[in-house]
Amino acid sequence: MVNKVKFERDDVIRQASQLFWEKGFHATSTRDLQEVINMRPGSIYAAFGSKEGLYSESLKDYTAQIQAQIEGFLNHSDAILSGLRAFVNNVILTRQDYPSAICMLIKANSEFTEKEDTLRELNLKLLRVFEQYLCVLFNQAIKNGELNNNRTALEYAQFFQIQFTGLRGYLNRPGIDELAQPMIDQMFTLLKNI
Amino acid sequence: MVNKVKFERDDVIRQASQLFWEKGFHATSTRDLQEVINMRPGSIYAAFGSKEGLYSESLKDYTAQIQAQIEGFLNHSDAILSGLRAFVNNVILTRQDYPSAICMLIKANSEFTEKEDTLRELNLKLLRVFEQYLCVLFNQAIKNGELNNNRTALEYAQFFQIQFTGLRGYLNRPGIDELAQPMIDQMFTLLKNI
DNA sequence: CTTGTTTTTGAGCGATCGGTCAAGTTATAA
DNA sequence: TTATAACTTGACCGATCGCTCAAAAACAAG
């Protein structure tokens, strides 16, 4: 019963997350949300307190989903880098299947100003959490000898994020699909050579 | 007289541009705009037709300003790459002086979905215009021998945009200012070696 | 079935949104 | 000075915003 409620709540959050990811926080209205999660305002506000509250849960869930997705690719790969490459390939090459071509955390980081304190702080915290997770992976990759130790795990993680973000942003326009694969290949070539 | 009017109109657009750049299209209200450009709704709508109309002018002006800024740095440099590097240094190292750390065209590209047709199409057009401008510069850099011709001007332009966008996004968070300069250096090192 | 508790509903609140327009002001020319 | 054209003003429009809450529905315990 507890699990039943939990499941439905997570389900609602995931649907809200998709809409927020696509449209951003400000362009998503509570009426839009009511429709996609099939709840009336009273229930939404009893469960999440506010639009911000629901967005917060959505952003946290998004981050957890991304990490779970990476874990999934890593479990089917024999090396960290090949798992990461499979993840990047999936995100970029099938980006039409997602609500947006751009990472929700990155969208949030460009949408919120310093004045929207609560949501910006949460966003920054989740970015740090994700970077920390990447550091764990790159540390392992260094230990495995997949990457040399000219650079620290943090530096590899930073490089990865910059490349990945830049690439997704650049490819978020029509008519350049055939560029995606060679650009991903270049990204991983650079990663191994910096 | 014609110039007088033109000047004031450009002035208004520039102020609106700063606000749109900072807050994005959806989070900027017409009341916000009224205040910063000191015009009443009737005048604004007589001059620009709609909030979208004023945003369009703002985005076009932003793009023109960026190109003018690059031209300025190029005029004080003896090489294309050093001019571009001065531009990148200025944008990133003094980003606190700007309304946002992130390029307004990139923000727009992540804010608008396919359904917001007019603004998204304008945004894509301006992105193409800017890329074309970069191609001219990189063509010259190749001719000058600043870059080898293993890559086309377009490929250099693409690489530049991906790195620059990724870098600005990554640095748009507090407490990592000392990372900016080495990352810029790395970006230009990579550019010469791809 | 009754009773008490929890959850859901949707009408509707005050605020704010993008935008309009009649009235007022200013600029120009005769 | 006066008539006319051009621009500016701000009260105000209907729509939509985020959100509330009394009433209804669903559920649980005895």
Image (tube, coloured by chain):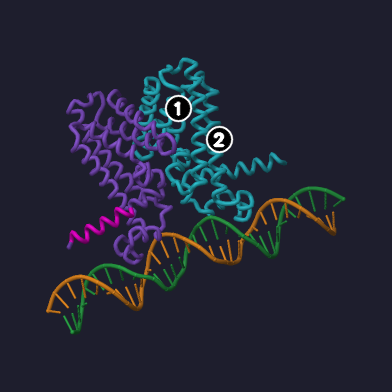
Chain colours: A cyan, B purple, C orange, D green
Relative to residue B27, is residue B60 drawn left or right? left
Q: Residue B121 location, x and y as percent?
A: 33, 48
- The amino acid on which the numbered mark 1 sits, given as a three-letter code, is Ala
- Visible in this render: residue A19? no
The earlier-in-sequence mark between 2 and 1 is 2
Looking at the picture, how far across and down is residue B72, in whole percent?
A: 21, 41
Residue closest to the eye, D4 or A175: D4
- Spatial distance from mark 2 to mark 1, Cα to Cα? 18 Å
Which kind of residue does numbered mark 2 sit on? Ala
The residue identified by callout 2 is A64
Q: Is residue A129 above or below residue C10?
A: above
**A132 left or right, relative to A176:** right
Chain letter behind tag 1: A
Q: Which residues are magenta?
A: B2-16
- Circle 2 — which element? helix
Q: Position of residue A28 (x, y in %)?
A: 49, 51
Q: Quadrant of residue B105?
A: top left
Residue at the spot 49% in from the left edge and 16% down from the top edge? A144
- Whether residue B190 is visible, yes or no, is yes
Q: Quadrant of the N terminus of chain A?
A: top right
Q: Is residue A40 magenta?
A: no
Q: Quadrant of residue B178?
A: top left
Q: At numbered mark 1, what does the secondary structure look like: helix, strand or loop?
A: helix
Q: Is residue B44 left or right of residue A18?
A: left
Residue A40 or residue D25, whichever sits in front = A40
Displayed quadrant of residue B46? bottom left
- Of B153 and B103, the residue lying toward us: B103
Q: Residues within 10 Å of mark 1 (few under 14, many from 20)?
A: many
